[in-house]
Amino acid sequence: MPYTTAQAPVAFSGYTSIAGSGNTQIIPVSANGVTQGLTAGNLYLVLPQSNVMNGRKFTVKAGGWVKAHGATQVIAFGLQCFPWNTTVSGAVATSGTATFTPVNSGQLTAGTFYDFQISQDFFGESNANTLTCFAPTVYVAGSPVTIVTTASPITVAYASASQTEPITGVNTTTDYPLASFVVTFANNTSDTVETLALTQFSCELSN
């Protein structure tokens, strides 16, 4: 049975975002999240330590809702990966690697709420320093979105244990997270009023 190993603070995801025409954007931290102490910028999910993720299959799940605004709006949801490589400082401020090519939903009706759900499996391998991306499952408004293209293995860095045995004093083993993930969206038309939010963003590790 899988178990949850990490979860992003979804209550503090962005509720209103400027959706530029055709541009991929990352769901940001809301103003309330900043007030509660989160760093302003993009909301991201940090995976557990790289050594824990080695040789393991895991699932990243994300979901939420969007309130359409534009009369002819369609939207595409996706995931991006940011390898940690000892520090994530500033890493999620720019584009990462898309784990699959997002595909637009059907046309949305202005003023209507729609749910979305993404589930994608990955496999980490320290010998190759890669993260293999499996084909995702994406739903918008309860209907499946056909995803054609999945990313090639993503290069990541695994920490190497540096603690001598027996341990004397402080444990100095180097072990940093494997990667971070963000949820992205792209509208076909510019819309500064459209509202969206995450209600789930987590990593589940298979036994």
Image (spheres, rainbow, N blue to C red):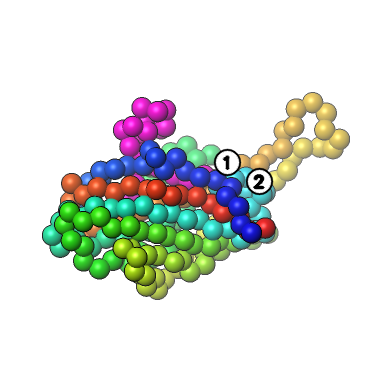
Spot occupied by residue 120 in the image (x, y as percentages of width and height): 49, 62
Residue in the picture at 74% in, 40% down: 162
Q: Are marks 1 and 2 in contact (CB under 8 Å)?
A: yes
Occupied quadrant, residue 86: top right
Spot occupied by residue 36 in the image (x, y as percentages of width and height): 40, 28
Please give left or right for residue 190 compared with residue 130 in the image: left
| Image position of 107 with respect to 184: above or below | below
Residue 91 can be seen, yes or no:
no
Residue 110 can be seen, yes or no:
yes
- What is the span of residues highlighted in magenta in the rendered image? 22-46
Residue in the picture at 66% in, 49% down: 52
Q: Residue furthest toward the right?
A: 166
Spot occupied by residue 64 in the image (x, y as percentages of width and height): 36, 52
Residue 86: numbered disc: 1
Judge whether residue 105 is colored magenta: no
- Sequence-wise, the earlier of marks 1 and 2 is 1
Please give left or right for residue 37 compared with residue 168 in the image: left
Provide the residue designation for mark 2.
Answer: 159
Tag 1's secondary structure? loop
Mark 1–mark 2 distance (CA, rounded to whole Å): 8 Å
Q: Amino acid at mark 1?
A: Thr
State the residue in front, 148 or 144: 144
Which image quarter is the N terminus in?
bottom right
Please give left or right for residue 131 compared with residue 166 in the image: left
Occupied quadrant, residue 132: bottom right
Spot occupied by residue 141 in the image (x, y as percentages of width and height): 31, 63
Tag 2's secondary structure? loop
Please give left or right for residue 149 compared with residue 161 in the image: left
